[in-house]
Image (cartoon, grey):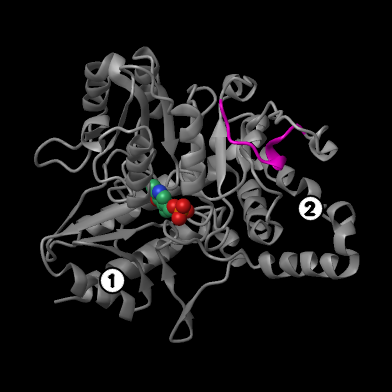
Amino acid sequence: MPTSYEASLSYAQSQDEIDILFPFRERFHFPKHEGKDVAYFCGNSLGLQPKSVGYLMQQELDDWAKYGVEGHFEARNPWFSYHHLFSERLAKIVGAKKEEVVATNTLTVNLHLLMLSFYRPQGKRYKILMEAGAFPSDQYAVETQVRMYGFDPEDAIIEISPKEGAYITEEEDIIQKIEEAGESLALVMIGGVNYYTGQFFDLKRITEAAHKAGAYAGFDLAHAVGNIPLQLHDWTVDFACWCSYKYMNSGPGGIGGLYVHEHHCSNPKIFRLGGWWGNDEKTRFKMEKGFIPQNNAGSWQMSNAPVFNMVAHNAALDIFDKAGIAALREKSERMTGYMEWLLKQVKHLPFTIITPADPKRRGCQLSMLFGDRGREVFDKLTNAGVVADWREPNVIRIAPVPLYNTFEDCYRLYEVLMSIE
Ligand SMILES: *Cc1c(COP(=O)(O)O)cnc(C)c1O
């Protein structure tokens, strides 16, 4: 970390001037506060709207009006194959082959579908290891999956927590739990980046340990995709799923995505629930009996592509592609480092940063745990046009997103904190 950081507006602006990604901010709509763009630190909850979405949405409306059903093949982006528009760009973001990913369904739905494939309890191998305090939807999904097979969640779900008094969970402890569970373990399913603390887990190491125990490893990447470069294929991760509306800026409830390693995709014995869009494309319209899954991640699709829900994803992934994952990560580390340093200069407010200090163990999120006054600080930020995120009971999460946040935004946040008596 540079030792030359300065808590001044001119320093922040000088960093923006040398930032090659600075112009990307122009591609997004910003909410306004008193007529000025807000400092938007909530991209980990709902990313901003790319300006190109409106135009691209209108294009689909026009094609529908002009072609009717023929739009499946005649539209500028034919709807029949619309989902194919995403695979290559998504594959780069998650570090996979394009056959291993598909944009489909939504996150929790995909988690269930993938667990139906990769959580197949047999004999004494029926347990799932996950992190304690996981995102509620993941907790409900895992709980109801084990119940479906007649197990008691208290017994079948192994939760892993940080050590007493700590906020982050050590990989060592996860590995140890996996080894202890041994032959009883069917699946390790954790969030790649914890939504609360912002901790990024060593997915490669966890996957290796799961495989050694004879279990599958799958990850919910809601807070990891578009935030941290991933190598799912090389890490031999079995499956993963994510949403697109957080760091990927693809709109509220936007299309989700999933990844399945090629050695599972191409194995028709891996069970998957059938739908026509998951069927082999060559026989899809023969309307015959017998589900023949595609030999790629597309086989986890059910229905035809929800085009209007995919337009924003198309727009947003183009922006990612132009910016490039490596450049985004480089800026992300620099800007998050600056934000963290600024927060550490704020000595008069009672908070601790519970996100790992090591850049390798986090993305761009920083979580501030308050003793008291958390809500008051959050309200002051909001009133000053700084959009952060409040999590009960007392955490303020902020995410300086490299695509559209600036060093000046970071300084603005700091300035509000300093102005609080
Ligand atoms: C955002 C988020 C979800 C939301 O799930 P949806 O099905 O998209 O509503 C689920 N899990 C995690 C870890 C998340 O961060």
Amino acid type shown at disc 2: Trp
* Label 2 vs label 1, nearer the camera: 2
Of residues 119 and 227, the one drawn nearer to the viewer in this rendering: 119
Describe the element under mark 1 as helix, strand or loop: helix
83 or 357, which lies in front?
Answer: 83
What residue is drawn where x is 88% and y is 51%? Answer: 73
Please tell me how many numbered marks the rendered image carries: 2
Q: Give the range drawn in magenta.
A: 271-280
The numbered mark at residue 246 is: none
Report whether 34 appears left or right of 72.
Answer: left
Q: In this view, does 96 lie to the left or right of 83?
A: left
The kind of secondary structure the magenta stretch mainly shows is loop
Question: Which x, y percent locates residue 262?
Answer: 61, 23
Residue 292, percent across and down? 71, 28
| Above or below, 235 relative to 189 | above
Q: Position of residue 70 (x, y in %)?
A: 90, 57
Does 275 appear in magenta? yes
Q: What residue type is labelled 1?
A: Glu
Question: Left of 250 or right of it: where is 123?
Answer: left
In the displayed orientation, state which residue is furthest to the bottom: 34
Q: What residue does disc 2 label?
A: 79
